Image (cartoon, rainbow, N blue to C red):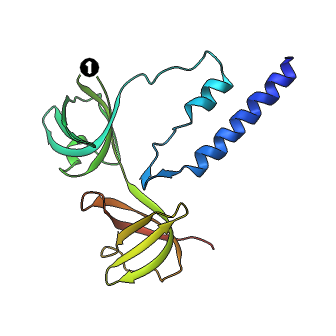
Amino acid sequence: MDNQAQGRKRRAVLGAGIVLALSLGTVGGIALAQGSEPIAVHAEAKPGKHKKAKNPVVIGTVAAVGQGTLKITKDGGGELSLTTDNATKVRGMRTLGDFKAGQRVTVTHKDGKALAVVLTRAHAKGTVTALNGQRATLVTAGGLAQTLDLTAITEKPKVGDLVAAVGTAAEAGAVLKVERLRQLPK
């Protein structure tokens, strides 16, 4: 195969991967990590050049934050205790000490040390299909129903509105406690 044909094949595979990645914005109501891309697309676009992630990542909730330590309750069970220091990067909060027990985080770690701690924001996008007091039911494009807790916002959506909601997971992930709600064009 000549260089032009190989280039066309790479662009076609990469384009298909981008469409796939965009269509899979959430899986089962759980948002995909930022920067994730289908491995097959990466491997196909650059044969033999695929690298494994450099450091492991854990997603869960903060169990405790102390001087130089961070304990995470991992999604799926189990607890992970990590050390922290001034080199530990923090996103979503000013300092590591600002994190509170119960907040969802994504932590990159290596050899028992937290390298980066990111506040993970829950989000959902879809059509409001029902309202019941301070709760709403949102149905995503994939047909999944998500319960929204609207107590923290003043402007409530109406049935039929297409919205994007951002907040925190509550009630063991069954409810999205909305902090921001944005109307989307229909």
Horizontal and vertical percent position of residue 13: 71, 34
Within 10 Å of the Cα at label 1, are there few (<14), some (14-19), or many (20+) other Cα atoms? few
Quadrant assignment, res 42: top right
Q: Name the residue under label 1.
A: 111
Q: In this view, does 135 lie above or below 73?
A: below
Residue beneath the point at 76% across and 35% down: 12
Q: Relative to 90, is 17 on the left or the right?
A: right
Query: At numbered mark 1, what does the secondary structure look like: helix, strand or loop?
Result: loop
Residue beneath the point at 34% across and 75% down: 150
Quadrant assignment, res 169: bottom left
Residue beneath the point at 62% across and 45% down: 20
Quadrant assignment, res 82: top left
Q: Which amino acid does label 1 sit on?
A: Asp
Residue beneath the point at 55% across and 63% down: 141
Residue 64 seen in the figure: yes
Q: In this view, does 156 lie above or below 92?
A: below
Of residues 139 and 34, the one drawn nearer to the viewer in this rendering: 139
Q: Is residue 77 above or below residue 165?
A: above
Residue 156 seen in the figure: no
Horizontal and vertical percent position of residue 81: 17, 32
Q: Which quadrant holds the N terminus?
A: top right
Horizontal and vertical percent position of residue 114: 27, 30
Q: Relative to 7, is 123 on the left or the right?
A: left
Q: Relative to 89, is 100 on the left or the right?
A: left
Q: How many marks?
A: 1
